[in-house]
Amino acid sequence: MIRALPVLALVSVLLCSTNTFAQPVIDGSWDPVYQVLAVQDTQTGFGDSNLGLVDYANGSELDVAYGVIKDGVLYLLLAGNLESNFNKLEIFFDTRPGGQNRLRGDNPDVDFGGLNRMGDDGSGNGLTFDPDFAADFWIGVTGGGAPYRLYANYAELGNPGVGLYLGNTGAVSDGVLVDGNNPFGIRVTINNSNVAGVTGGTGVGNGAGVLTGVELAIPLSAIGNPSGPFKVCVFINGLFHDFLSNQVLAGIGGGGNLGEPRQVNFGSIPGNQYFVVQPEVVRYRISGVIELRDYGGDVTQVPITVELRREGVAVRSEVLYTDANGNYALSNVEPGTYDVAFKASHWLRTVVTGVRVRNADVTGVNVSLTNGDINGDNEVSLLDFGALVAAYGTSPGDANWNPEADLDGDGDVSLLDFAILVRSFGAVGDE
Ligand SMILES: [Ca+2]
Ligand SMILES: [Ca+2]
Ligand SMILES: [Ca+2]
Ligand SMILES: [Ca+2]
């Protein structure tokens, strides 16, 4: 009897918008998408800022390194303070084989010789990183003056290498740099208002929880287009790049300022004086809002099996449950072209249109919800009964196997499928 049959009617299928994929906003403040990459473990020997102003700070500290890669751009928030007396924030990247474990003295002349001020002066010294860190790129940030400006420089290490003054910007800006040479479009700004984090001293400290500081957007093309994990070493240095503080990430485990950069050897300090950035995880998401109504008109929710097929071959199958909003979502779908089939174990087939995929790299999506309508003519009739009989008793690989007849998706065509068809028999979709 039709009246006794459950009927599925598609009421709406909408793209479920989500902020999960948003990239950070360059403004000097934390964003939810960031991951913690390193936390300071040492009090600051460069002054504990207590001004609370977004631009001027009377101390420097590196409390937390946050980072994430989105759409080929590395976002870094180096939370803490950068004293507005032109203290230097030095960022070294080890993104590819080779490079300089000990800084040479003949790298590009950038920031008034500042980069080479840390390198070998000809006597065989030079800032030395941990043994498994060989620097390839450098970005330096410094700020001060009235009105306050933040300045950024860049180098690809080597001789000749590349050295660029990227430009300058204000505090809490969008990070766009002016009056420089910035072919990669690197952005940076500062929010210097932190008054928490580590305190002044030489003991152990804890920078956790600080959410403001120097925030950068660095296209990966600027640092050699790394495709795998890479390493970053960050520290605060003096006005002329000539006096290394005790603010290094990852931290030095307590202790005073390190002094003359050319004599510093991170390899002789316990632990890694760098942190690792993981490659971008591309997450695709198929989502929709589907309302299922029975004959009484009541909205009901059932688990569905969603199957992704490539040229007819199932590559992924997963049982999905709705959330409180009636939303089915499938995450982490690899780029490609799919047919997408939804199966619900005791609902009439209907065609689902308008399900959208969040990323344009996933194309050609056709979506259908099947139940009982084996031949796809949008009703459950004797034709479907015949199709089920033809496939009865088969499993994948058998000559007469028909995946559409496997209504409950358990891998064979059996009495269970028959029962589903009988329950839906006579019903018509999309009513
Ligand atoms: Ca931000
Ligand atoms: Ca390297
Ligand atoms: Ca502090
Ligand atoms: Ca070390």
Image (cartoon, rainbow, N blue to C red):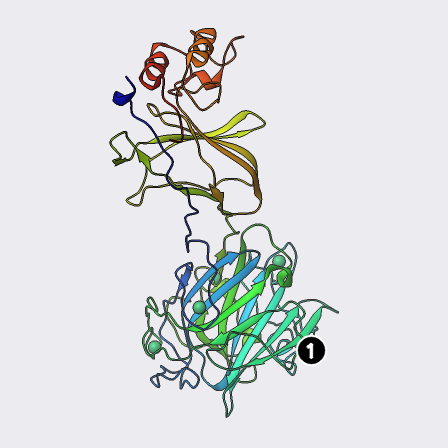
Q: Where on the picture, by quarter, is residue 192?
A: bottom left
**Is there any visible trace of residue 130 in the rendered image?**
no
Give the left or right position of residue 169, taking residue 386 as reference. right
Q: Is residue 354 above or below residue 310?
A: below
Is residue 125 found left or right of 345 in the rendered image?
A: right
- Ligand 2 under 8 Å from disc 1 Cβ: no
Q: Quadrant of ligand 3?
A: bottom left
Residue 238, percent across and down?
51, 82
Are there few (<14), some (14-19), or many (20+) residues within 10 Å of tag 1?
some
Using the image as rendered, state which of residue 382 and residue 314 is in the foreground: 382
Q: Nearer the viewer, residue 152 or 27?
A: 27
Q: Which is nearer the eye, 403 or 186?
A: 403
Residue 135, percent from left and from top: 60, 63
Percent x, y for residue 391? 47, 9
**Image quadrant where residue 61 sits:** bottom left
- Residue drawn at the location 38% of the way across and 84% of the way down: 53
Which residue bears the numbered disc 1? 109
Give 79 or 373, whichever is nearer the viewer.
373
Label tally: 1
Label 1 residue SS: loop
Task: Give the quarter of the figure containing the C terminus.
Answer: top left
In the rendered view, tell whether residue 47 sits above or below residue 106: below
What's the residue at 38%, 36% (across, down)?
10
Quadrant that contains the N terminus: top left
Residue 403 in the figure: left or right of residue 97: left
Q: Horizontal and vertical percent for residue 249?
A: 45, 66
Mark 1 residue type: Asp
Residue at image location 46% in from the left, 58% down from the top: 22
